[in-house]
Amino acid sequence: MKPLQFINPSSIQEASQLVQTNGVSALLIAGGTDLLDEIKEGVERPDKLISLIELEAMQGIALTSSGLEIGASTTLAEISSHTTIVGDYAALSQAAESVATPQIRNVGTLGGNLCQRPRCWYYRSINFDCRKKGGSTCYAQLGENKFHAILGGSDCLIVHPSDMAVALISLNASITLMSADDSRTLAMEDFFAGPDIDIMAENILTPGEIVTSVNIPTASANAKSIFLKAKERQGMDFATSSVAVAAEVSDDTISSIRVTLGGVAPIPWRATAAESVLIGKTLAGVDLKEVGEAAVHRAKALEHNGYKVRLTAGLTRRAVETLLAEWH
Ligand SMILES: Cc1cc2nc3c(=O)[nH]c(=O)nc-3n(C[C@H](O)[C@H](O)[C@H](O)COP(=O)(O)OP(=O)(O)OC[C@H]3O[C@@H](n4cnc5c(N)ncnc54)[C@H](O)[C@@H]3O)c2cc1C
């Protein structure tokens, strides 16, 4: 590993300025659980690390008049055990609890989880100059693709690795980004960008822009949510498929529902067709098989990942069934 300068800026603006001034040689670091791996693997080669972890403005969980605000440097462990999150935003605490190991959750942050780079083994290997690194070939297309995308992939078949993103999109969260002289807030699902938008990135962050917080609207009294994840190993592992469902039920009828899939596409994938077959249905009128089929109706399997189509349909069915049972 080459020598690195570690810089502790005193404000978000200074951190942003440092990245803007230094270009690609300076990278933001929070807990470092993903970035340090990338540096050790030779995928990233910065000269400077700009640390966000001591900036108080990016820490903590606060109840506001419009909902819950979570600072981007809040750890996954804090999120998974926060009383309000466990009670009112179950999908988020379940997603946080499903990430990696206690050691990684104690250090890894929400911002880092949302901005972590893909786990595709071709992208992570210095031996493959894949399209995400500026090359001309997606090696997963004809290679070892058992963990790759079945939805929304074309020129690059990574799957987005963040479990937190899947839960947050179903919970209709927004995300706030700040740079040295500006800030903007957008819907969480608009933060992520597929290969058709920028093949070398997974989100719309501009150079020097920093994720500072995530906001989730106040949960209504009749709202509930769930996150389920399938993985190859029972222990620490990324999702082969995951699903988060957030719903509101009034007078036995589904009045609002959001279904998001993880581990199956280059971005967390809103399953709008599954939502359409659920919205307005009475609890007794839900056809679970139809829901599962709708979730994967546009899926295209590669040579080695056909199992993901059935797995995702089944997982979606199970998540919807389990969640709706809470109103019975
Ligand atoms: C063994 C292992 C297993 C894992 N399993 C899972 C899993 O099952 N599910 C899952 O979702 N994740 C999993 N992860 C990923 C883990 O959740 C992330 O590594 C962690 O959340 C990243 O947080 P961090 O603070 O350490 O980020 P860092 O490593 O510090 O940063 C990660 C990336 O985000 C950028 N970044 C960090 N913070 C910000 C910010 N505020 N604004 C803009 N950019 C920022 C950095 O520049 C870097 O590119 C696993 C990781 C490991 C090592």
Image (tube, helix red, strand yellow):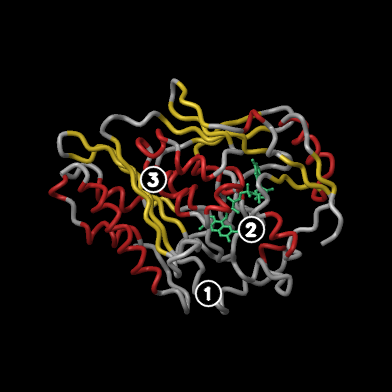
Q: Nearer the viewer, mark 1 or mark 3?
A: 3
Q: State which quarter of the image contains the C terminus.
A: top left
User: Percent position (x, y) of residue 94?
Assistant: 41, 48
- The image shows residue 155, relative to residue 328, as above or below, that is below
Q: State which quarter of the image contains the N terminus.
A: bottom right
Residue at 44%, 50% (x, y): give it: 95
- The image shows residue 217, relative to residue 37, as above or below, that is above
Q: Check disc 1 and report the residue beneath it.
A: 145
User: Percent position (x, y) of residue 51?
Assistant: 74, 41
Q: Check disc 3 and report the residue beneath it.
A: 91
- Mark 1 neighbour density, 10 Å: few (under 14) some (14–19) many (20 or more): many
| Label ID, residue 175 | none
Pointer 2 with pointer 1, Cβ within 8 A: no
- As helix, strand or loop, the secondary structure at mark 3 comes to helix
Q: Check disc 2 and report the residue beneath it.
A: 199
Residue at 64%, 54% (x, y): give it: 33
Amino acid on which the number 1 mark rests in the picture = Asn
CA distance for labels 1 and 3: 28 Å
Q: Nearer the viewer, mark 2 or mark 1?
A: 1
Amino acid on which the number 3 mark rests in the picture = Ala
User: Percent position (x, y) of residue 117?
Assistant: 63, 56
- The image shows residue 148, relative to residue 23, as above or below, that is below
Query: Horizontally, is 136 left or right of 249 in the view?
Result: right
User: Percent position (x, y) of residue 232?
Assistant: 45, 70
Amino acid on which the number 2 mark rests in the picture = Ile
Task: Tell which circle, 2 or 1, labels the residue nearer the N-terminal end.
Answer: 1
- Mark 2 neighbour density, 10 Å: few (under 14) some (14–19) many (20 or more): some
- Mark 3 neighbour density, 10 Å: few (under 14) some (14–19) many (20 or more): many
Query: Horizontally, is 295 left or right of 328 in the view?
Result: right
Task: Tell which circle, 1 or 3, labels the residue nearer the N-terminal end.
Answer: 3
CA distance for labels 2 and 1: 18 Å
